[in-house]
Amino acid sequence: MAEFGWAYIECSGSGGGGNASAQGPTGSLQFHTGSQGISGSASLIYLTASNTLNLTGTLNVSGTINAN
């Protein structure tokens, strides 16, 4: 069975299935914490109103970054 390092979370539904409860500030990148836990960090937040991704801290990149 394939494993994925990402997840799409639909927040408008009524829920059901699973015990995971997402934590963290609105717009934060969500990550798996173990034991069905999902959390977020104020250090990496996507602001939909301004179409901006904010990162606080260090960004380490191995490879190419293309920007237009």
Image: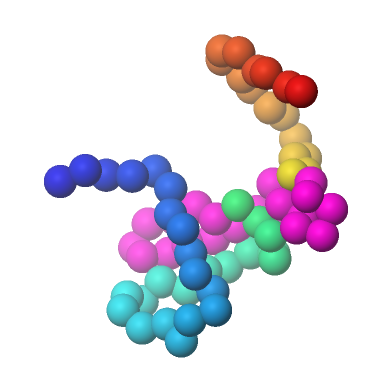
Q: Is residue 28 left or right of residue 32?
A: right
> Residue 39 location, x and y as percent?
54, 60
Q: Which residues are magenta?
A: 30-52
Residue 43 visible in the shown view: no
Q: Residue furthest top?
A: 63
Q: Is residue 67 or residue 23 the one in the foreground?
A: 67
Q: Residue at x 27, y 44 (%)?
A: 3
The picture quadrant where one finds residue 58 is top right
Q: Residue furthest front?
A: 68
Q: Residue at x 41, y 71 (%)?
A: 20
Q: Is residue 29 or residue 13 the one in the foreground?
A: 13
Indicate whether residue 33 is drawn in magenta.
Answer: yes
Dominant SS in magenta: strand
The picture quadrant where one finds residue 36 is bottom left
Q: Is residue 59 left or right of residue 63?
A: right
Residue 53 visible in the shown view: yes
> Residue 14 location, x and y as percent?
46, 86
Q: Residue at x 79, y 46 (%)?
A: 52
Q: Residue furthest left?
A: 1
Above or below, 39 relative to 22: above
Q: Is residue 62 left or right of residue 67?
A: left
